[in-house]
Amino acid sequence: MGASTPAVEVRDLAKTFRSGWLRRRETEALRGANLRVERGAIFGLLGPNGAGKTTLLSILATLLLPDRGTATILGHDVVREAFAIRRRLNMASGNASFVWSLRPAEVLSFYGRLYGLHGRALRSRVGELVERFELLPHLKTEYNELSTGLKQRLALAKALLNEPEVLFLDEPTLGLDPDVSIRIRGQIAELRRERGTTIILTTHYMREAEELCDRIAFIKGGRILAEGSADDLKRQIRIGDVIALRLEPAAPFGLAALPGMMQVQARGDRVECTVDSSEKRLPELLRWLADHGVLVRDCQVHEPELEEVFVELAR
Amino acid sequence: MSSRAEPLPAVPSRGEGWAEEWVRLTAFAYRNLIMARRNVFFLFELTFWPGVAMISHGLLTRFLDLTPPMTAFILVGTIALSAVQVCQLDVAYAVLFDIWSKSMKHQFLTPVRIHHLALGSWLVGVGRGVIVWGLMALIGSRAFGFDFVGAGAPRVAMFLLGCFMTALVIGLLVCALVLLFGTRAETSAWAAVNFFVMLSGIYYPVSVLPGWAQTLSAGIPLTYFLDGIRAGYGFPSAYAHPFAIGFALSLLYVVLAHWALAAAVTRSRRTGLLLKVSE
């Protein structure tokens, strides 16, 4: 029962921050965001700085109250049922921070207790997470003496204390060395694979989003501008695939009129054709060139990166 | 997957065992104890300032050549101030540790309630308050002949409990102020302790205060606890049942301060301050 209830559902969510006493300043962080995340998915939220990603995540994590709209986690309202739903979610941020004098196992024990864990269950959970995130050699180190990577691993370990069904990760690999980032990404993927945890993450790293996320939403100015898989997004904004050819003789007239052709740029014997789908258009293009007696000396296909989608949407 | 949302059973939020309640409550005690053990300044709070206060006030009573009951009158006030200060600090630490380390959001991500946070840290505060009382009583009796149980053990116990309840109220209000105004509120919140203590007749009878101040002091529980223990040293009581009034007022203020902190948490979730003071 309840398997068809989405992990997260957001409708018309709005939030404005107000600051200043004499000069009142208002910042609209969210302006009617809508979102649906299915259970067991890894969902990415992309967008430029100040787009509203962290605000959206914070509302979903019950840390912030929205001004308008509704948000549900596993069918439960994040405002009215915040206390109850906190048992089933957790969050980790890229720039996590904990009390400076506590050691890793103490941090985990403190938050574990807040989740109601005690006795043998608490000890075994803390032990398991210490082992899983390779914190064992650092058990005597106080938090403020841990490296950034270790702090990040501890933050992730803390986020798994209650075995959350929904996990929010705000820039989980921010500022980490590439090798640590790869390991953390591996652990995120493993979480979904092993436990079916629904993960919603924000990131600035397009490769991370493309590697991990089933679906991605692009948010800007507090609105979700586009949503879909990485391939869907590329198609939606019609950046197109580029087919670069070296021809002999040069490209004949009429190439631009071919179906699916978005742009043609010719320079000498080289021509770059931007098409809606290289998979679909390349055979047609080669056939057409052969029919016109043109020899293809070289052919390269370049599919757009998610980064290009980001740049296009952030414009 | 289907897009139709089926209603889920309510997430169980009530009916949790007492064990879980106790564990959540003691989580804050666990953290405060670790911090107290690991930071040398916590030892200062416990020994240096209370010791200095007791010795300097004791010397003052010597200089003024006060009688033993008058010495007790003054030194009881000295003990009250230190016990309230140390205990309220522990309650405030429940929020201040997270403010200082910018980790506030983590505890409010968990299913923790205000009473867990308040009572857990208060327990450590009570323990540290008792140590402070013991130390001050020892210095007072050895150096200045102060009979710290001269008012009778039950009165001393009620007086200390009263001090700790006052500390709980002040600590909760400090937490609420910090969550409402951020770190700017820290200093003013601590200053407030001295203001309340001043109005409650810390080293003098409330009758020497101006009329308007006496009206204010009538609303402060510590006024009644100081009056109650001083009655045990032979000073006439201004109230028929000072401890009963003091405890009734304390209970009322604990409820109000609890509500104020809960409201401050909700407001900080609305304004976004909870996030600003986190990471």
Image (tube, coloured by chain):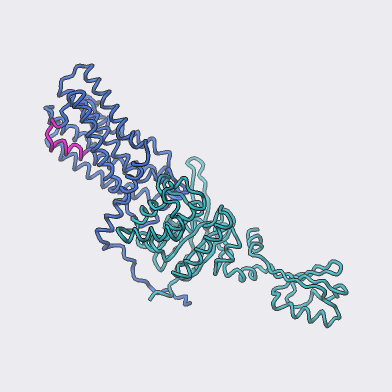
Chain colours: A cyan, B blue
- Please state if B128 lies on the left or on the right of A284 as rendered: left
- Please state if A53 lies on the left or on the right of B138 as rendered: right
Residue at 39% in and 66% down: A76
Q: Is residue B175 visible in the rendered structure shown here?
A: no
The picture quadrant where one finds residue B38 is top left
Residue at 27% in and 23% down: B56
- Please state if A212 lies on the left or on the right of B193 as rendered: right
- The location of residue A219, given as percent across then percent down, is 56, 61
Q: Is residue A121 above or below residue A264?
A: above
| Residue segment shown in magenta | B149-162
The picture quadrant where one finds residue B137 is top left
Q: Residue furthest right?
A: A249
Q: Mostly what secondary structure, the magenta segment?
A: helix
- The location of residue B25, given as percent across then percent down, is 29, 52
Q: Is residue B146 above or below residue A68?
A: above
- The location of residue A1, given as percent across then percent down, is 38, 76
- The location of residue A56, given as percent across then percent down, is 49, 59
The picture quadrant where one finds residue B154 is top left
Q: Decide which of B75, B211 is in the foreground and name it.
A: B75
Q: Is residue A170 above or below residue B241?
A: below
